[in-house]
Amino acid sequence: MLARRPETRYAVIPDAGHDAHLDQPARLHDAIRTFLRSAP
């Protein structure tokens, strides 16, 4: 993915399974906010 989309970021959401939006919504939102703030 990184080779095709260099803006891609890898994030690990601790204590979350496949449904990170249900398991750890605040941590997921933090990761998304961080990504969006770093976008050009």
Image (spheres, helix red, strand yellow):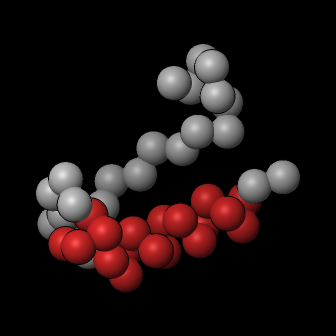
**Is 14 in front, or is 4?**
4
Q: Residue at x 39, y 69 (%)?
A: 28
Above or below, 12 against 2 in this view is below
Q: Which residue extends farthest top?
A: 3
- What is the quadrant of residue 36 in the picture? bottom right
Residue furthest out toward the bottom? 26
Is 22 left, or right, of 4 in this rendering? left
Q: From what the image shows, is residue 24 above or below residue 35?
A: below
Rendered residue at 63%/19% (across/down): 4
| Quadrant of the rendered image containing residue 37 | bottom right
Name the residue: 60% across, 67% down: 34
In the picture shown, does residue 24 fall above or below 11?
below
Q: Residue furthest right?
A: 40
- Could you tell me which residue is drawn at 61 percent across and 59 percent down? 35
Give the vertical position of 22 relative to 36 (above or below). Answer: below
- In the picture, measured across the screen, residue 30 lies left or right of residue 13, that is right
- Expressed as whole percent of the image width and height from the top left, the position of residue 17 reads 15, 57
| Left or right of 22 on screen, residue 7 | right
